[in-house]
Amino acid sequence: MKSPRERIVETTFDLFAKQGYNSTGINQIISDAGVAKASFYLHFKSKEDLCVEFLTVRHKYWFNELHAYTAQSKDLRSKISSAFDFLIYMNDKEKFRGCSFLNILSEIPMDNVKILNVIQAHKADLRNYFLELLKDDALSDHIYMLFESSIIESQLFKSNELILKTKKVVNHLIP
């Protein structure tokens, strides 16, 4: 059986995806996770702290999935291409949920530095992922922006069409 903390975080994944951050209350999380209110507050001082934990867990999960998905790629072009295929895989797996980090960003006030820092760190890690592969600032930022826009557009239109088109563009950009 999972610990109360694990159940809280797991429940948060489901509720934030279905309802969003602002529409999900602590009492619903407590109820759906099957934990006592005291257990919740033992692990998290606030909903904001829970959100930081959620994003931290999501970050690790997302990058583990990305690395596992692209691990079989032999060369640079196929590795970058498989990163875009990974988006299709995640869209299929999560029903076009989109980026959890940007979804939360749209719901928090910009002065919520605690959550904003976690979101910015995730995006910085993604930019660095492409920079480490490509070793070219301008090209890696270009690929990163195409990757990000593919996430947003596929969520918006519930379609992988733009990801497939973007892969063709990306293949022309990579030397």
Image (cartoon, rainbow, N blue to C red):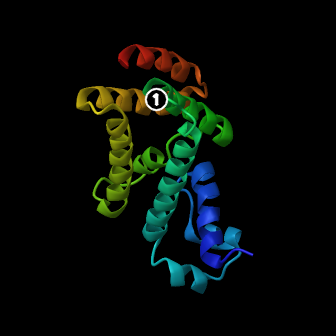
Q: Which x, y percent locates residue 17? A: 59, 50
Question: Would residue 97 appear left or right of 100 to someone viewing this image?
Answer: right
Placement of the N terminus among the 4 image quadrants: bottom right
Question: Would residue 111 appear left or right of 168 to someone viewing this image?
Answer: left
Viewer-nearest residue: 13 or 23: 13
Instruction: Tell me if residue 7 comes above or below residue 123 in the rendering.
Output: below
Mark 1 belongs to which amino acid?
Ile
- The residue positioned 49% from the left and 49% from the top of the image is 63
Q: Name the residue furthest left.
A: 137
**Could one spot residue 21 in this view of the protein?**
no
Q: Which x, y percent locates residue 30? A: 63, 73
- The residue positioned 30% from the left and 31% from the top of the image is 141
Instruction: Tell me if residue 66 comes above or below residue 145 in the rendering.
Output: below
- The residue positioned 55% from the left and 40% from the top of the image is 71
Instruction: Tell me if residue 52 comes above or below residue 99 in the rendering.
Output: below
- The residue positioned 57% from the left and 26% from the top of the image is 157
Query: What is the count of numbered marks?
Result: 1
**Could one spot residue 134 in this view of the protein?**
yes
Badge 1 crowding class, 10 Å Cα cut-off, few under 14, some 14 to 19, many 20 or more, is many
Residue bearing mark 1: 80
Question: Would residue 21 appear left or right of 128 to someone viewing this image?
Answer: right
Placement of the C terminus among the 4 image quadrants: top left
Residue 92, by quadrant, is top right
Residue 145, by quadrant, is top left
Q: Which x, y percent locates residue 51? A: 47, 63
Q: Which x, y percent locates residue 78? A: 50, 26
Viewer-nearest residue: 86 or 98: 86
Instruction: Tell me if residue 68 comes above or below residue 167 in the rendering.
Output: below
Q: Name the residue furthest right.
A: 1
Disc 1 on helix, strand or loop?
helix
Viewer-nearest residue: 35 or 167: 167
